[in-house]
């Protein structure tokens, strides 16, 4: 009985989630590093955009405020997904930005 019970518990355990990680890095004319790592959860469709390896803000008008960053993320998601995604805050619900 104990062996059968342990076997049933193993079958009830959830399968590991499928994650895909993509990364890109580029440099501005002054050498400032722009770096993003995107982790996509294939199970629930959520994604994390991690900009934490990007260099600090620079003097001048080259910085992107949060609204511009979110706008770029929405644009990229609409290009990659073969669906008509509405252009509103709802499409960012499964997205987390770090």
Image (cartoon, rainbow, N blue to C red):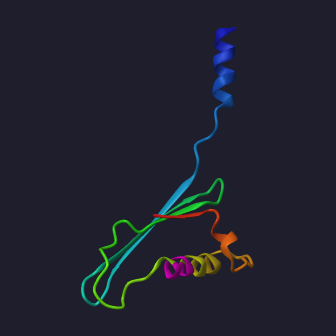
Relative to 5, 73 lies left or right: left
x and y, in percent, of residue 16 in the image:
58, 43
Position in image of residue 76 (x %, y %) = 57, 79
Q: Is residue 13 above or below residue 87?
A: above
- Please state, as top left, top right, bottom left or bottom right, where the C terminus lies in the image: bottom left
Residue farthest to the top, as pictured: 1
Q: Quadrant of the N terminus?
A: top right
Which residue is more in the foreground, 71 or 13?
71
Which one is nearer the viewer's eye here, 58 or 27? Answer: 58
Question: What residue is shown at x 43% (from left), y 82% (from top)?
Answer: 64
In the rendered view, would you say 62 is above or below 67?
below
Query: Within the magenta stretch, is there residue 69?
Result: yes
> Which residue range is magenta in the image?
67-72
Res 13 → quadrant: top right
**Vertical position of residue 68 compared to residue 21: above or below:** below
Residue at image point 73% right, 76% down:
83
Residue name at image x 60 percent, y 77 percent: 74
Against 79, residue 6 (above or below) is: above
Question: How many numbered callouts?
Answer: 0
- Is residue 12 found left or right of 69 in the rendered image? right
Q: Position of residue 23 (x, y in %)?
A: 42, 68
In the image, is 27 to the left or to the right of 75? Answer: left
Residue at the extreme left: 31
| Residue plotted at (72% across, 76% down) | 85
> What is the chief secondary structure element of the magenta stretch?
helix
User: Quick check: is 79 in the magenta stretch?
Assistant: no
- Locate residue 52: give its quadrant: bottom left
């Amino acid at each position: 009985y104990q062996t059968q019970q342990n076997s049933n518990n193993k079958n009830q355990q959830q399968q590991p989630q499928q994650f895909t990680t993509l990364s890109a890095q580029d440099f501005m004319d002054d050498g400032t590093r722009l770096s993003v790592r995107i982790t996509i959860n294939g199970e629930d469709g959520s994604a994390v955009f991690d900009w934490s390896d990007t260099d600090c803000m620079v003097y001048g008008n080259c910085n992107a405020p949060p609204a511009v960053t979110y706008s770029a993320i929405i644009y990229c998601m609409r290009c990659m997904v073969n669906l008509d995604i509405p252009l509103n805050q709802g499409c960012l619900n499964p997205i987390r930005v770090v």
